[in-house]
Amino acid sequence: MKKLLAAALAALLLSACGREPAAPVSLPAGEWPDNACTEGLPALSGKWVSGGAMDPAGQWCSVTLYGVPEEDFRGFREELEALGFAEIADAEEPVRYPDGKEGPVSENALLTDGERSVSLSCQDGAGSLLISREKTE
């Protein structure tokens, strides 16, 4: 999971290189974002969107989800793969608490179609997506 998160962070940082950082734009809860990052992607139900943020330049978009059934989250991933997204990394592992006990399983994946990367993370119905577009400048 650490490698997956490092890859997602690297993709985000690389997409921001060479320009002044601008404050992200908050995305509303209750609706799937409609922007350059999500264009052409399958949409999860807005009822699960609890918020998000977007780069004003349209290079990345993050979506926070809550209450997503596992089968819908997996279905979203399968739809991405049907659109030509290929898996770069995949990890499933239980959360380990400081006292040594294991918690729920965290499912994580990083996919790309060569133009966009999608990082998915889901645990117990809560999840997040980070969609980043390749820099075109």
Image (tube, helix red, strand yellow):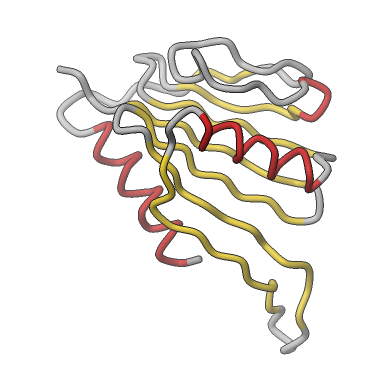
Quadrant of the image occupied by residue 41? top right
Above or below, comparing residue 16 to residue 124 in the picture: above
Which quadrant is home to the C terminus?
Answer: top left
Q: Find the residue positioned furthest to the front.
A: 82
Above or below, comparing residue 69 to residue 90 in the picture: above
Above or below, comparing residue 1 to residue 5 in the picture: below
Residue 56 at what x, y percent from top left?
40, 14
Q: Is residue 121 left or right of residue 45?
A: left
Q: Find the residue positioned furthest to the bottom.
A: 100
Which residue does the image show at 73% across and 56% down from the upper left? 123
Which residue does the image show at 71% across and 79% down from the upper left? 97
Which residue does the image show at 43% across and 36% down from the upper left? 85
Quadrant of the image occupied by residue 6? bottom left
Q: Is residue 35 left or right of residue 88?
A: right
Q: Is residue 50 left or right of residue 20?
A: right
Looking at the image, which is closer to me, 102 or 77?
77
Q: Is residue 26 left or right of residue 58?
A: right
Which residue does the image show at 61% across and 16% down from the upper left? 33
Residue 46 at what x, y percent from top left?
77, 20
Quadrant of the image occupied by residue 47? top right
Residue 50 at what x, y percent from top left?
75, 29
